[in-house]
Image: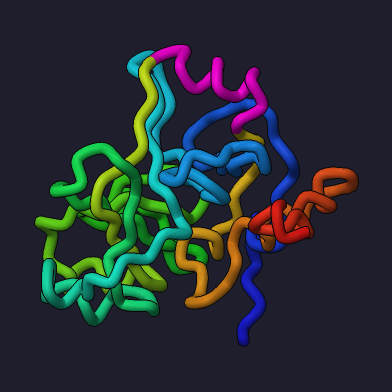
Amino acid sequence: MAQSEDPEDHFAPATHRVRAGTLLIANTDLMEPTFRRSVIYVVEHNDGGTLGVVLNRPSETAVFNVLPQWTKLAAKPKTMFVGGPVKRDAALCLATLRAGLQPNDVPGLRHVQGRIVMVDLDADPDTIAPAVEGVRIYAGYSGWTIGQLEGEIERDDWIVLSALPSDVLVEPRVDLWSRVLRRQPMPLSLLATHPIDVSRN
């Protein structure tokens, strides 16, 4: 595998300020089923609030059944992912840019952070294909009004961390929640070993 020249691919420093491109990791006490052990990628964070997608909730629905023209570009598993509880009937698409490319050079792409871009699903997949390593399509998203997320972070519902480009197109059957925590410095990395069901411990 060719080594990417972007140091961002291998080292994501812990961060405590929410911005586009950060991850929200559900803390071990957040038991609400929608967000339990979820990893959310923040797509927008501004005066209007925060919008993100859950990265680790694949659905049973094949991309082919909803947006067949994007099947070839979809990263495995080629299923729709559940981005969150808001607007489940709307689709949002993220992609990882190929190293060295600028998002502004390709119509239909909007830069989020680093090598992550948002893809206009009305664009022509053949135009997008040479620029990206793969796409992932989310049904719905997770949203917070202004100040709401900050309150949840203060309450320790979420841990704010930096994302790596590989987090967005995470391979099938990888426990992304544990993987992100494991790469943090101690004591945060210890949370990765937290049992899924405490009652079984």
Relative to the observer, which residue lies in front, 81 or 60?
Answer: 60
Determine whether 159 is above or below 12 in the image.
above
Determine whether 128 is above or below 78 in the image.
above
Relative to the observer, which residue lies in front, 128 or 186?
Answer: 186
Q: Residue furthest front?
A: 199
On the question of residue 182 being in view, the answer is: no
Q: Position of residue 93 (x, y in %)?
A: 28, 55
Relative to the observer, which residue lies in front, 23 or 96?
Answer: 23
Q: Is residue 154 magenta?
A: yes
Lateral position of residue 88 relative to residue 5, left or right: left
* Quarter of the image that includes the C terminus: bottom right
On the question of residue 61 being in view, the answer is: yes
Lateral position of residue 134 relative to residue 4, left or right: left
Q: Residue at x 47, y 35 (%)?
A: 20
- Magenta stretch? 146-157
Q: Is residue 117 magenta?
A: no
Q: Residue at x 64, y 44 (%)?
A: 162
Lateral position of residue 110 relative to residue 122, left or right: right
Indicate the colouring scheme: rainbow
Determine whether 120 is above or below 145 in the image.
below
For residue 160, what is the image quadrant?
Answer: top right
Lateral position of residue 106 relative to residue 177, left or right: left
For residue 96, what is the image quadrant?
Answer: bottom left
Q: Position of residue 10 (x, y in %)?
A: 71, 62
Relative to the observer, which residue lies in front, 21 or 84?
Answer: 84
* Quarter of the image that includes the N terminus: bottom right
Q: Position of residue 72 (x, y in %)?
A: 24, 81
